[in-house]
Amino acid sequence: MHVALLAQHAGRFRGSLDDPAINYSTGPLDNVVADVNAKLKDGVLTFAFDSRNGYLNSALDALHLPVDSQLLVFSRGSLQGKLIDDQNPRAVYFNDRVALGWVRDGDVLEVAAHDATLGAVFYTLENREQAGSGASRAGPPQFKRVFHCLGCHQTGDTLGVPGFLMFSTTRRTGTQFDGVPRHIDQSDPFERRFGGWFLTGSTGSARHMGNDLPALDSSPSRELANVDRMFEPSGYRALTSDVVAHLVLTHQAGMANLLTRAGWEARLATGDPQLVAPIMDGIAREVVDYMLFVDEAPLPAPVHGTSGFAERFAKSGPRDSKGRSLYELDLTRRIFKYRCSYLIYSPAFDALPDRIKQPIYRRLKEVLVTFPKDERQAILEILRDTTTGLPQYLQ
């Protein structure tokens, strides 16, 4: 029997970042940027400066950020907002561990890494050529950890933890410095998404807020195959801002924040197990319902990207004995072919304390029972073959 499920609205972490169980400011780092910094310091890795985009090329290579993931945002709501508009959009690149923002002629590269236990950890890299010839007198470049980003990146929209944000912004009017931003996740209907962003690819008959620019007002369709001739492209690594990449990053940002909150709440949850257990069950419900896309807004029409992101992404990740992967995409009715988030493979999931991981597994079973049999069986077989620590009742 199929049972309809409604996802629960996520709560907010209300503890202290400086609690010894969290230790956000001074705790040991376990993320890809920390690894790159160590290689730069030891001379194992070097960065080359480009006259048009600075250290962008080297940073993308070092962090394994694919060019096809590039997203272009022209709303100004970020650290270097004064430089951003539709003629100089901010470029965002990402993979499943880290996201990087570059603004042409900006002072810094902005990076957010998903740490195994600390949540989103923020860095900047000075994007100006350092004085000296050969080895810089100031030493090799280093990503500098920063905390001012928490002013925006630790709010109710990030569940109260240092996290990732995705906004859709209304069009700027004559009375506004910029449009009005609205936080979005995978539950938001398609027509509310992409405001303030360039969007390339096809969305069929589906309406959305992307590409809302005066230059396109006379166009019968706001669809763009690429951003060629929309602005002067020097320095940018691609001419795309792929719709599929946007959908994937929106899911990933919300999932990462939920995993961080779950880990933090579990590390703070001490005392009577009979009192702690219901709290963990509630948090597990939030995590799993998002992980299994219970709250996902359906795609109103098939979508197609133009950057090659979808094709590359779908080939990523571990595969089961039948060649199936959680990274495979659907893009007709929903984002993914198999409704289970690939962030179940993330270090943040692996690092979850047992007091929250076991309720997550129990909830996983409860929700999967409501899935069509073929899909449920496929997901369980993929998890069995590609993860460790899965309870016997899920195998």
Image (cartoon, rainbow, N blue to C red):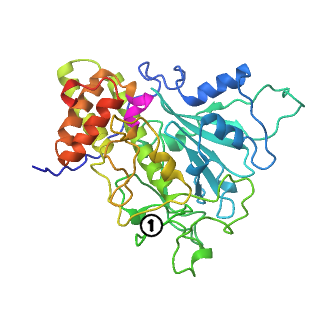
Query: Which quadrant would residue 351 be assigned to in this image?
Result: top left
Task: Say if residue 369 shows up in the picture.
Answer: yes
Q: Is residue 345 magenta?
A: yes
Side (left or right) of 153 relative to 59 = left
Residue marked by disc 1:
203
Residue 133 in the magenta stretch? The answer is no
Q: Residues within 10 Å of mark 1 (few under 14, many from 20)?
A: many
Q: Between 236 and 378, which is closer to the camera in this rendering? A: 378
| Principal secondary structure, stretch drawn in magenta | helix
Residue 285 placed where, x, y %? 25, 38
Please tell me whether residue 274 is drawn above or below residue 9 in the rendered image: above
On the image, the x and y values in percent for residue 51 come to 81, 47
Q: Residue furthest right?
A: 133
For the point 20% across and 42% down, which residue is it? 367
Residue at the location (49% across, 51% down)? 311
Q: Which residues are magenta?
A: 343-349
Q: Quadrant of the C terminus?
A: top left
Q: Which three-letter amino acid code belongs to the residue tagged 1?
A: Thr
Q: Is residue 267 above or below residue 225?
A: above
Q: Which residue is rendered at x = 48% and y = 66% of the image? A: 202
The image shows residue 231 at horizontal and vertical percentages of: 69, 65
Is 114 rendered above or below residue 246?
above
